[in-house]
Image: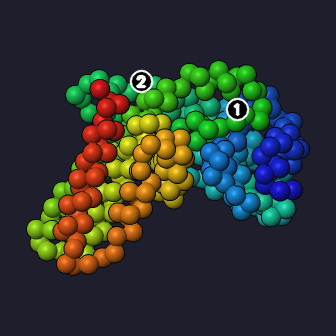
Amino acid sequence: MSLVKGIEDKLEILELFPEVKNNNKNIDYLYIAGSIMEGFGNESSDVDVFVISEEPEKLLNNHKRHAREATMKVGESLIKNIVINDVRYDFEYYSSSHFHTIINELNSLNFNTDEHISRLPADDVDLLHRLKFASPLLHEETFKTMKEEINFENLNKYIVVTTIEKYDGYLEDLEGALSSNDLGTAYVVVKLLLKNAVNAYLASVGETNPGEKWIYRKLLRYTTENPEGDLLKLFLQLDSYPFSEETIKEYAFNVVNFTQGLIMKAQIILK
C-alpha cells in the first residue's frame, strides 16, 4: 500500500487495524494528523494516528500484535510504533480527560492582560497544533464539533508570545557575544534570532510551527499564498550567510533590523 493511497482512503487504514475499528465505542476520537495532513509528507513519512479514549491503556493492550512494533510512554501519551508494508504508523493514545484539559487550558488563556500567561507543556502545544490539520477516522460529526470549539487563535497568540520571549533572550545573548568579541557564538545566535522571528511571524498569520524542520515548507506555503512578499527569499539569503569575522557585526545588524520588523508585525495579533 502506498502512503498517499492510505491517507486518501481512510477506511483502508482502519482495515489494517480492525482491533481499533471494532472498539470504536470505547474511542472518543480517532484521527490522522502530522506532516502528511499539512501537505508536507512524502512516501517515507510516518502516519500519525491519535486515539482519544477514557481507557487508553486498555485499548493499547488490546492492540493486535505486529511483527515490527515498539511501545513507549512519553509524557501523558502512550505510543505504539508499527511497521506494515514498509509504512510506519505511530499510534498515540491519550486519556479523554487529559485531552479535554489541554483544550480547556488553551481556550481559557487571556492575552488581554499584563499578567503572566500560563505556560503549556511543549507536547501539549504540539498536540494542539496537529489538531488544526487533523482528519477523523471515526465519529466524524463529534470530531467536527470538538474541533470547532477549540480556540486556535489562542494557539497562534500563545506561540507568538512564547517565541518572542525566546527571541528577546537570544537578543541579549547576541549583545553579550558581540561585546565580548565572541564572534562565533554571535554568528550562531544570529541564526537563532532569525528562525524565532520568522516562526513568531508565521504563527501570527496562522502558520504555527512548533518544530524546526518545516520552517522552509511553512515559508514556501505562506509566500505562495502571499506572492507580494519576499519573506522566503530574504530568510534564505540571511540564513545562508557565510561566517566571516570581518562581516559578522554587519550581518548581525542586518538580521536584527529585519527580525525587529517581523516581531513588530507578529505583535499586532496581541492587540
**Looking at the image, is 49 positioned above or below residue 177?**
above
Q: Looking at numbered disc 2 in the image, what kind of residue is underneath it? A: Ser
- Residue 55 image-quadrant placement: top right
Looking at the rendered structure, the secondary structure element under dot 2 is loop
Q: Which mark is residue 182?
A: none
Can residue 195 be seen at all in this image of the molecule? yes
- Residue 119 image-quadrant placement: top left
Quarter of the figure with the C terminus: top left
**Looking at the image, is 195 positioned above or below residue 93?**
below
Please name whichever residue, 42 or 24, is drawn nearer the observer in this view of the structure. 42
At 38% across and 57% down in the image, what residue appears? 234
Can residue 101 be seen at all in this image of the molecule? no
Q: Residue 62's x, y, as percent?
A: 80, 45
Quarter of the figure with the N terminus: bottom right
Q: CA distance from mark 1 to mark 2?
A: 22 Å
At 70% across and 42% down in the image, what residue appears? 32
Question: Mark 2 — residue?
Answer: 108
Q: Residue furthest front?
A: 228
**Looking at the image, is 26 positioned above or below residue 60?**
above
Question: Mark 1 — residue?
Answer: 29
At 40% across and 37% down in the image, what residue appears? 204
Query: How did the renderer colour the structure?
Result: rainbow
Q: Looking at numbered disc 1 in the image, what kind of residue is underneath it? A: Tyr
